[in-house]
Image: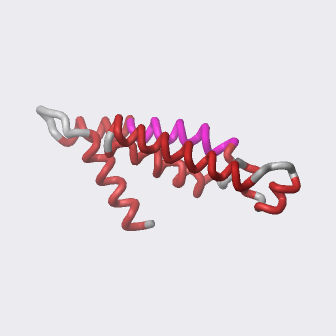
Amino acid sequence: MNTLLIGDESATTLGIDVTNVRKIYLAFSAAVTGILVAAVGVISFTGLVIPHIVRMIVGSDHRYVIPLSVIVGSIFMIWCDVVSKIILKNGELPIGIITSMVGEGLSLFG
């Protein structure tokens, strides 16, 4: 994936069939996203948003983006869970509401 970032011509000279690789990545990411949203629901937006936030912080090198996305996404979900338990004293607010509020907040600034 890092090779595709340097440009189509450079990736082609390095022996990568850019068209086929893009088709494979597109199909794979669409399938995984569809399965996750169907299985988990709206809360899975975290898997779509957190990598973009991490990419803005550390750059576009996938060697750093992928592992840091896992860590930052996990920390984000833990804090959303903590906030959802703090807001209601005798109950628990669904965590999807917290993540949706954060997503809306991010969309206002993005």
Q: Main secondary structure of the magenta part?
A: helix
**Residue 78 in the image, given as x and y percentages of width and height:** 38, 35
Nearest the viewer among 16 and 109 is 16
Q: Quadrant of residue 77?
A: top left
Question: Which residue is located at x 35 percent, y 35 percent?
Answer: 39
At 83% across and 56% down in the image, what residue appears? 12
Quarter of the C terminus within the rendering: bottom left
Using residue 108 as the reference point, say whether residue 49 is left or right of it.
Answer: right
Question: Does the magenta segment cover residue 72?
Answer: yes
Q: Which residue of the protein is positioned furthest toward the left in this rendering? A: 90
Q: Is residue 66 magenta?
A: yes
Seen from the viewer's position, the closer of residues 42 and 32 is 32
Look at the picture and state if 70 lies above or below 46. Answer: above
Q: Report the residue that reaches farthest toward the top.
A: 90
Q: Is residue 37 left or right of residue 8?
A: left
- Which region of the structure is painted magenta? 63-77
Judging depth in this view, the residue of 1 and 95 nearest the camera is 1
